[in-house]
Image (cartoon, rainbow, N blue to C red):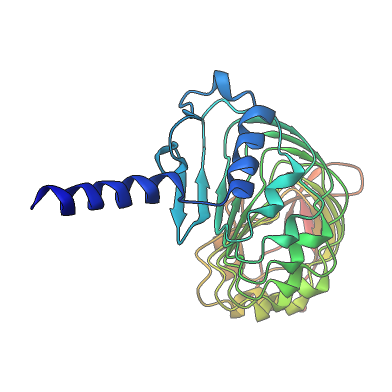
């Protein structure tokens, strides 16, 4: 009599393993595998096995919720079909050899909380649709070859805590909307080609702990409002063209002590004063 219940449980378990996601979602994963040279991955997928056994894939309630394939020798482009994984909460493809553009309709991934495509060979601009992912907390696209300006509506990401875009070819000014993201803890925009000033509205980013604009082309007065960021522990805004005097507290925070470049490309140090009526800069 015990044999029948055992057979039933075995059948149900086997069925659940085989039917763990829809055929359409499985096809998206297969497309990703094929588009990024899956046969050469460090940790390959056995396409004949249930999806729940595939390396780096997490399934919950019959939907793919996480893909973690960092440092796994992915070579190729991210297929546009990836946006059909509507339950996806995490996509981590850090440190591979992914080229091409970020899928233009990436914003369809409404549940996404973590998007890490850093340390690849991505090109093109950051799609404006990224601003539609209202649940996004971590956006890391650093160490690529991304161009163009930051999306104007990036401030719509009201839950964003980490924005790491350093070592790209981004141009233009920091969108005003970004200063309204009060949840931001880490903002790394260094080693791009950003221009314009740093708004005094930066003081709105009350959770900010780590802030870097190092090695851009930004100019204007360094806003004293930076001093109002009580959680700020690390900052580097050097090697821009900022001018004006700065307080001792700000200078201490900056990793390179407010070392700037003047219009002739000569290294200058901003004057550190407690009296705000003091002179502007002194050449190094």
Q: Does 130 appear above or below 72?
A: below
Q: Is residue 49 left or right of residue 229?
A: left
Identify which residue, 92 or 29, lies in the foreground: 29
> Looking at the image, which residue sits at the far front?
1
Kindly identify the residue that appears in the image at 86 percent across and 41 percent down: 265
Closest to the observer: 107 or 7? 7
Residue 223 visible (yes or no): no
Q: Residue 148 at what x, y percent from top left?
A: 88, 49
Q: Camera-side residue: 233 or 153?
A: 153
Instruction: State whether residue 95 appears in this view.
Output: yes
Residue 41: x and y in percent read: 53, 23
Question: What is the x, y in percent for residue 219?
Answer: 85, 60
Residue 169, position as x, y percentages in the image: 81, 42
- Name the residue at the top extreme: 40
Does residue 247 sit above or below 281 in this rendering?
below
Q: How many marks?
A: 0
| Residue at the outermost right position | 263
Residue at horizontal 52 percent and vertical 37 percent from the top: 70
* Left/right of residue 115 with respect to residue 200 in the rendered view: left
Residue at point 69%, 71% (across, down): 157
| Quadrant in which residue 275 is drawn | bottom right
In the image, is 233 to the left or to the right of 174? left
Residue 112 position (above or below residue 278): above
**Left or right: 279 as drawn, with respect to 188:** right
Work out whether residue 214 or residue 77 is closer to the camera in this orientation and state it.
Answer: 77
């Amino acid at each position: 009599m015990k044999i029948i219940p055992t057979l039933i449980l075995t059948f149900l378990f086997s069925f659940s393993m085989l039917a763990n996601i829809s055929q359409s979602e499985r096809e998206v994963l297969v497309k990703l595998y094929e588009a990024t040279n899956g046969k050469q991955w460090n940790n390959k997928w056995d396409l004949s096995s249930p999806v729940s056994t595939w390396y780096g894939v997490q399934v919950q309630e019959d939907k793919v919720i996480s893909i973690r394939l960092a440092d796994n020798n992915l070579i190729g482009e991210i297929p546009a079909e990836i946006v059909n994984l509507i339950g996806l909460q995490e996509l981590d493809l850090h440190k591979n050899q992914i080229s091409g553009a970020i899928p233009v309709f990436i914003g369809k991934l409404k549940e996404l909380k973590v998007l890490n495509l850093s340390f690849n060979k991505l090109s093109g601009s950051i799609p404006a649709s990224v601003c539609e992912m209202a649940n996004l907390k971590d956006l890391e696209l650093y160490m690529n070859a991304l161009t163009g300006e930051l999306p104007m509506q990036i401030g719509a990401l009201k839950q964003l805590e980490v924005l790491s875009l350093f070592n790209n070819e981004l141009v233009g000014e920091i969108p005003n909307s970004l200063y309204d993201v009060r949840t931001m803890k880490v903002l790394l925009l260094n080693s791009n080609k950003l221009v314009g000033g740093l708004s005094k509205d930066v003081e709105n980013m009350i959770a900010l702990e780590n802030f870097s604009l190092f090695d851009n082309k930004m100019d204007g007065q360094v806003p004293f409002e930076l001093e109002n960021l009580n959680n700020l522990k690390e900052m580097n805004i050097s090697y821009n063209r900022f001018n004006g005097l700065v307080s001792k507290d700000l200078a201490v925070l900056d990793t390179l002590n407010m070392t700037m470049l003047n219009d002739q490309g000569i290294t200058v140090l901003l004057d550190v004063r407690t009296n705000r009526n003091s002179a502007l800069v002194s050449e190094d």
